[in-house]
Image: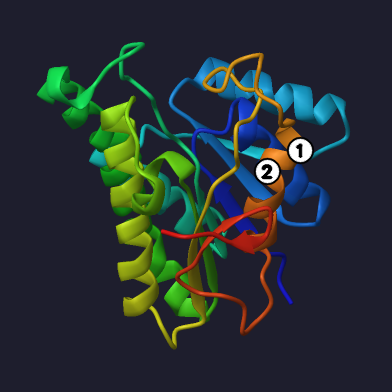
């Protein structure tokens, strides 16, 4: 079997970087992407110094031109894509924000990255997955997007993750029978720039479920929402 090709968006730091590291150590050829070339190449250098081989390509998930260029690069250089981890995301809500005071622009900008980015990237890369009859798509969501436990605070972020979960369900339904599995996961509260230093979970813990979903065997779950490899309510 040809070596599996995995692409991780927004992976120059945090959970995305750790997912890239773990996938590479499992033998996948990983394409790490970021919207900053300097930060992306610095991440690649750090991984290389730790004997982890990962490739780099520039990607701004809010730019259709950037997404198209990436898809063309993947098709030309690798001829396939087996794993897509939609990790790139933003939390733009001001501290203490509430939905009744929220600015529509915050919602638009958040959805541009957290929903439309994964949508357009998936649309661009699924044809390559279908060509080989295999694919694993992992959407980095959050418990803050769960309708079952919806609360106050970070309204734009919450809406974007709920929408991402809906996208997961629709993609899973449309791709049933193609060999492509689509799932969402919640990493939990992780020590990252977004999560902050008080978060109780490590990067390794936050990345584990994404890596598990990215390497599911045939017949694995499809259209699910997971934390710590266990299904959680929508």
**Is residue 99 positioned above or below 27 on the image?**
above
Describe residue 123's horizontal placement relative to residue 218 as left or right: left
Q: Disc number at residue 121?
A: none
Q: Nearer the viewer, residue 76 or 137?
A: 137
Q: CA distance from mark 2 to mark 1?
A: 5 Å
Residue at the far right in the pictured view: 51
**Is residue 156 positioned above or below 115 on the image?**
above
Q: Nearer the viewer, residue 212 or 20?
A: 212
Q: Disc number at residue 207?
A: 2
Residue in the picture at 51% in, 82% down: 179
Q: Is residue 54 visible?
A: no
Q: Secondary structure at mark 1?
A: helix
Residue at the far bottom in the pictured view: 177
Residue in the picture at 74% in, 31% down: 202
Q: Which residue is mark 1?
A: 204
Q: Quadrant of residue 67?
A: top left
Q: Is residue 43 visible?
A: yes
Q: Residues within 10 Å of mark 1 (few under 14, many from 20)?
A: some
Describe residue 17's horizontal placement relative to residue 118 as left or right: right
Q: Residues within 10 Å of mark 2 (few under 14, many from 20)?
A: many
Q: Nearer the viewer, residue 169 or 128?
A: 169
Q: Position of residue 87 (x, y in %)?
A: 50, 41
**Is residue 99 positioned above or below 20 on the image?**
above
Residue in the picture at 33% in, 13% down: 96
Q: Position of residue 51 (x, y in %)?
A: 88, 34
Residue in the picture at 66% in, 16% down: 198
Q: Quadrant of the C terminus?
A: bottom left
Q: How is the image coloured?
A: rainbow
Q: Secondary structure at mark 2?
A: helix
Q: Are marks 2 and 1 in contact (CB under 8 Å)?
A: yes
Q: Position of residue 164 (x, y in %)?
A: 34, 51
């Amino acid at each position: 079997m040809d070596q599996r090709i995995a692409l991780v968006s927004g992976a120059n730091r945090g959970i995305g970087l750790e997912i890239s590291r773990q996938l590479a150590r499992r033998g996948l050829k990983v394409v790490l992407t970021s919207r900053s070339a300097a930060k992306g190449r610095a991440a690649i250098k750090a991984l290389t110094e730790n004997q982890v081989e990962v490739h780099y390509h520039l990607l701004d998930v809010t730019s259709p031109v950037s997404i198209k260029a990436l898809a063309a690069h993947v098709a030309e250089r690798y001829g396939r894509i087996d794993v897509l981890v939609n990790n790139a995301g933003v939390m733009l809500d001001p501290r203490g924000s509430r939905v009744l005071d929220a600015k529509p622009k915050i919602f638009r900008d958040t959805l541009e990255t957290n929903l439309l980015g994964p949508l357009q990237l998936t649309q661009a890369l699924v044809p390559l997955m279908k060509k080989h009859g295999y694919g694993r798509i992992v959407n980095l969501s959050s418990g803050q997007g769960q309708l079952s436990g919806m609360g106050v605070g970070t309204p734009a972020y919450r809406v974007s993750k709920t929408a991402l979960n809906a996208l997961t369900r629709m993609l899973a339904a449309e791709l049933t029978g193609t060999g492509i599995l689509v799932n969402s996961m919640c990493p939990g509260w992780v020590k990252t720039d977004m999560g902050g230093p008080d978060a109780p979970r490590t990067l390794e813990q936050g990345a584990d479920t994404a890596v598990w979903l990215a390497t599911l065997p045939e017949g694995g779950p499809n259209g699910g929402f997971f934390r710590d490899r266990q299904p959680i309510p929508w």
